[in-house]
Image (cartoon, rainbow, N blue to C red):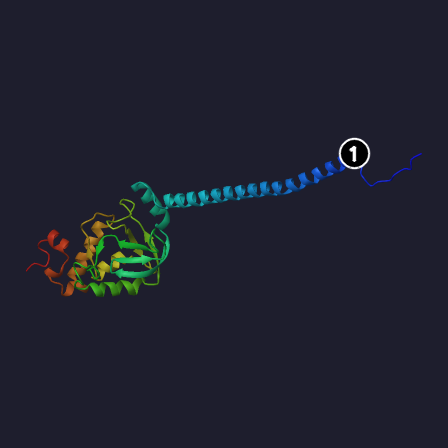
Amino acid sequence: MLPLICTNRPSIEEKVSRESTKRIKNNEQNTIPYAMSRRRRTGIIVLCMLAIVVFVWLDYSHIRGKWQSQPKSEEQAKAYDFQKYHTKTFTVVNVVDGDTIDIDIPDEPYEHTRIRLWGVDTPETKNPDLGVMYFGPEAAEFASRLVLKKSITVYLDESNNTRGKYGRLLAYVQLPDGRFLNEVLLVEGFAYADSRFRHSFYNKYTQLEASARGLKKGLWENVTREQLPEWLQQRKANLLSK
């Protein structure tokens, strides 16, 4: 009888089992980085989509804001200005000259809103073509004393457009004491009644100028015809003529 020989060689079943286990481990090792890579790609795609959505929203908001702040038609512009300025109180931050001031509210694209007073024309001080006209500095200084760094109330003319030739806001400016700067300039002889443009107080302003002229107030004491604005010389041929 032959003796039994013991060996460590695995049986066929053990070999099959070991091969199966090895394949499973290999599959798991290959699947984990693939799954991680797929999740990473998905995350990047989601982040890109969110970035696009935010960019589009910001861009649209900017465009919408510009559209809302810049009305298309003349009527829309007038309604917008009335809502923004009419009967509202602001602080004067700069006096350009006697009939032009800046107030502390933005007027795109400008930091402040520039107001041109309705119905009056003061002698020029900043015009490069005309230079400094007679009584211009005095008118600017007078206006500065009345309004600079003070609160004023803006009134627009319902029967007219709210903007002038250069985009400035056309307004009547009420002083803290209740008077209107437009009228005070005329009464004290620092401005001419501007007859080039009709407005709600056209006749009143003409009378105020005539009264100041008769009393020789302000500039009317010594002004000569040659020192008058060109438009006034053309419209009133006999004014101050000898």
**How many residues crowd around disc 1 within 10 Å: few (fewer than 14), some, or many (20 or more)?**
few
Extreme residue toward the right, this view: 1
**Residue at 29% from the left image edge and 42% from the top image edge:** 74
> How far from the left and from the top, in percent, is residue 44?
54, 44
Q: Is residue 118 left or right of residue 214?
A: right
- Rendered position, 127 above or below 73: below
Tell me if residue 153 can be seen.
Answer: yes
Q: Nearer the viewer, residue 93 or 135?
A: 93
Amino acid type, mark 1:
Ile
Q: Position of residue 217 (x, y in %)?
A: 18, 64
Q: Which residue is mark 1?
A: 12
Q: Nearer the viewer, residue 33 or 214?
A: 33
Quarter holding residue 21 = top right
Q: Secondary structure at mark 1?
A: helix
Query: Toward which corner of the image does residue 147 lie, by quadrant?
Result: bottom left
Left or right: residue 170 compared with residue 129: right
Q: Residue at x 31, y 41 (%)?
A: 75
Identify whether 233 is placed above or below 4. Answer: below
Q: Residue 3, position in %: x, y? A: 91, 37
Q: Where does the image place residue 8, in percent across and percent down from the top left?
A: 82, 41
133 vs 62, nearest the viewer? 62
- Residue lying farthest left? 242
Q: Does residue 161 lie above or below 92 as drawn? A: above
Q: Is residue 46 left or right of residue 55?
A: right
- So how many labels did they put on this image? 1
Q: Residue at x 20, y 50 (%)?
A: 203
